[in-house]
Amino acid sequence: MQDPINFYTAELDTYQNLSKKLFKTMSVLSLLRLGIFLITVAGIYYTFSNWQVAFGIGVIGTVIFLFLLSKYTDIKEERALYKRLIVMNEEELKILSGDFHERADGNEYQNPKHYFSLDIDLFGKGSFFQFINRTAIKEGSDKFSSFLLSNNILEIEKRQDAIKELATFPEWRQKYSAIAQGVEVEHSAHSIINWLKSYTPFLSKTVYWITLGFSLASIILLALIIIQTIPVDYFGYWLLLGLALTAFYLKKINSIAQKTSNAKDTFRQYALLLREIEEAKFTSQLLIEQQQKIKSNGLKASQIFSKFSKNLDALDNRNNLISIIFGNGYLLWDIRQTYHIEQWINKYADKVEDWFEVVTFFDAFNSFGNYAFNHQKFSYPKITKELTTISAKDLGHPLLNPEKRVDSNLELHEEQFFIVTGANMAGKSTFLRTVALHIVMANVGLPICAKESKYKPIKLITSMRTTDSLTDDSSYFFSELTRLKFVVDTIENDKNYFVILDEILKGTNSTDKAIGSRKFVEKLVKQNATGIIATHDLSLTEIESQLEAVKNYYFDAEIINDELYFDYTLKEGVCQNMNASFLLKKMEII
């Protein structure tokens, strides 16, 4: 694969040049339009005495003007696409430089009652979501967050293959996102799907045939009037009859017109995205399966959507005064177009949800593919069934600067529990979040920040950032106990969880905390739990000598020449150097 920085720089240069060329073309077309308009007006003025010639000049000038306008509109849309691609490549270069903290942070997906979402900087300012998310539509963002939160340990290798493949298609991914960003959608796909599924048609096939017969009768009536077989008055009476028939269904037609008007932009957006998916050549099983979902009786979903969009546009013409009066009066236009829309809904309403789901899937997985492309030195965990839950070499946190990041080796077996001690700021909490992200990313199918890793799939549960709640009238300590009970109860029902705890029972005195923490860890070990707890309480490390499953590790700190130094490296054993008093003195607090 290409180097990400070189790729984004080259793409940025390419689209900037293309945008400039199209701008020049647009300027030329604008001048041509103006010229054609002036020539046409002048031609009509000087030939006005000969109306046949003037009419011909007017028709030819109008046709050329409309052709140039259509060409201008197409080029304008193409340039808008390039401008979005320029912004995307500029954004990628900024993110790779570490500047990503002003992007959407996904804080709306934060859930304190979830297994781990509150504890591991998954959402919020400076979060993993903020760093990795590239979704272009709201439903895609929802789908993306659901993948991160899913705790799904099945078919990981299948997801890995899909992400690996998408990582090799940076141009396709960017075009997909640029198209998605190009359509402003006011109404969610979810609301549209609910409407389609609950819709009940009110027009029968008989009514449709009546509209065709009425239109044919209008043409015959016009012909008879032209040849002066019947008086012209009949054409007016016929118009009133057509308007009366339309008025009979007007309330229901207005209702469906309002709904379809809300859905029109969404369908246009999704039709374009479906076409991109259909035309892509995928080889990984998961991506091919997604492609298969958007095929229906040999027809492509994009074609079906395009047909529906044309029906919606046809009904939308009712906003034209001429169409309202003459279209309905002589052709029963609104009734016939409404019938076409109802038939489409009746045939495809149940499939639309699947098609929308595929679009949002690719919007979400493009973010994963983009992440893999940007981090080609990261490794995909080798999925194993061995007793080792995580065996990682040079494991680090993916959001830390690679030049400053200190990586650690980790070997943690099934039903083994680590107690990690260490001085303040020595790296305990960062290490816990590193391990947690390894699990989350591995389960999603992402490459992880490690030289290599063997991983036996396991779900994650944490208790690290419990807060009190004024709305629930609960104290901090009660909230923490509730969370710990949630952990215990979860493991009781399912052993396949990796537990991560950070300084538990902070809401009580030190003696009570030491006794309680010890009993809680013993409880987890008795439940055959796998996991890690970080603590400042060195007495907790005594459990290692009593329980074979428990192992002690620590992060160290040294005071050299009245300065504090950290090596941020995980070591086996118990920390002996604490630094709270030193820091209080150093900062002149005491």
Image (cartoon, helix red, strand yellow):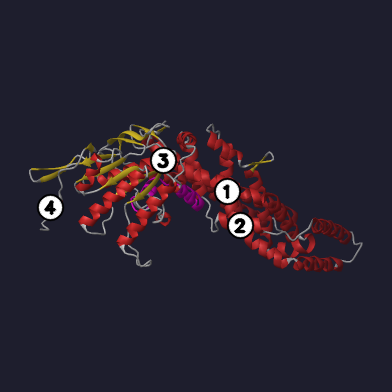
The three-letter code of the residue at mark 2 reads Asn
* Image spot of residue 380 (x, y percent): 40, 33
Residue carrying label 1: 356
Q: Where is residue 425 in the image (x, y as percent from the top left)?
A: 21, 48
Task: Please name whichever residue, 515 or 402, is drawn nearer the observer in this view of the structure.
Answer: 515
Amino acid found under the numbered disc labelled 3:
Ile
Disc 1 residue type?
Answer: Phe
Would you call the spot at circle 4 few (<14 residues within 10 Å), some (14-19), or many (20 or more)?
A: few
Mark 1 vs mark 4, CA separation in Å:
58 Å
Q: Distance between the residues labelled 3 and 1?
A: 30 Å
Question: Can you say which quadrant of the picture contains the C terminus?
Answer: bottom left
Q: Is mark 3 on a helix, strand or loop?
A: loop
What's under tag 4, amino acid-wise? Answer: Ser
Residue that lies at the very extreme toward the left in this rendered image: 561
Q: Earlier in the sequence, mark 3 or mark 2?
A: 2
Sequence-earlier tag: 3 or 1: 1
Nearer to us of marks 3 and 2 is 3
In the image, the segment drawn in magenta is: 123-146
Q: Where does label 2 land, which residue?
A: 194
For residue 575, the mark is none
Report if residue 129 lies within the magenta region: yes
Mark 3 in CB contact with mark 1 (< 8 angstroms): no
Name the residue tied to disc 3: 458
Mark 3 or mark 4, which is nearer the start of the sequence?
3
Q: Nearer the viewer, residue 355 or 154?
A: 154
Q: In this view, does 20 lie to the left or right of 534?
A: right
Residue located beneath label 4 in the image = 581
Whether residues under marks 1 and 2 lie with C-beta atoms below 8 angstroms apart, the answer is no
